[in-house]
Every structure is written in structure tokens, then in C-alpha cells.
Image (cartoon, rainbow, N blue to C red):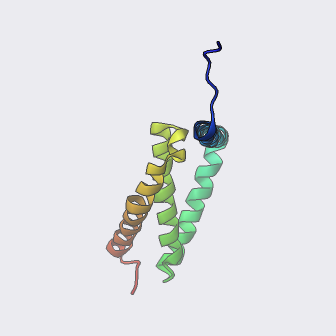
Amino acid sequence: MNSTSTATGTEFTKKTLDAFFNAIDEGTKQAYRMLWNALLSFLSAHWLSIIVVLAVILIIAAVRAVLGRWGMLGSVLYNYLYFGILFVIGLIWGSDVFASNWLTITGTVILYPACYLTVRVILDKTGLRRY
């Protein structure tokens, strides 16, 4: 007698679906690793140019804010703050953190409003934000 069992019915379906979802998860993590490595490689090769471009954008936004158009400065500050925090999170926990649902939830519930309110406080304290 053969004592091996074959997956039948719901067992087969469950195993197939589990394997499918695990493959999607691993593929997503691998894609994030590849993109993160490419980003770090690019940043390390061109760090001075990137800093100069970001500084020029910030200076242009600050000049426009002094002239009364503070919207660009708010947007630039928000994006620098938000993506800067995401970059630090990626440096600390690695690229796999971007594939997790907790970062999506945390970003939506905590990070978006925190960055928005921080930029609002900065603009209010400097007197550049007008109602």
C-alpha cells in the first residue's frame, strides 16, 4: 500500500493560494530591494548634484514665499519632510519595510498629518503663511 497522500479538493486550493500569495509577497519585496539599491547607488554617485538641486528649489520657494506666494514653499517643505522621513525609515529598517502594510497605515494615519501640521507651524512661525 502506498501511504503517501495527495492534496485533494480544498487542501489543494488552499496550498495553491498560499503559494501564490507568498510568491507575490516575495516578488514585491524583491522589487523594493532592487529599487532601493538603485536609489542608494544613484544617491551615492550624485550626492553633491542632488543637494545643490534641492537647495536651489528651496531657495526659489523661499524667495517666492517672501514675495507673497507661500504655496510652493509649503509644498517643498512638506515633500522634503515626508520623503526625508521615509528615507530615514528605509535606512533604519531596510527596503522590506516599504512592502509592509504597517508603513502604509502609519503613513496615512500619522505621517501625512504630522508632516502637514509641522509645515503649517513652520510657515505660521515665520509669518510667511497668509490666510
Between 101 and 69, the one lying in front of the other is 101
Q: Choose top left, top right, bottom left or bottom right for residue 11.
A: top right
Q: The C terminus lies in which quarter of the figure?
A: bottom left
Q: Choose top left, top right, bottom left or bottom right for residue 129.
A: bottom left
Residue 52, how many percent across, how many down? 60, 53
Q: Is residue 14 above or below residue 115?
A: above
Q: Residue furthest bottom?
A: 131
Q: Residue furthest top?
A: 1
Residue 3, how many percent across, how many down? 60, 15
Q: Is residue 74 above or below residue 47?
A: below
Residue pictured at 47% horizontal, 58% vertical: 82
Q: Is 96 displayed left or right of 41 in the figure?
A: left
Residue 116, how many percent across, how many down? 41, 68
Residue 94, how many percent across, how many down? 51, 37
Between 9 and 60, the one lying in front of the other is 9
Residue pictured at 45% horizontal, 44% vertical: 89
Q: Is residue 99 visible?
A: yes
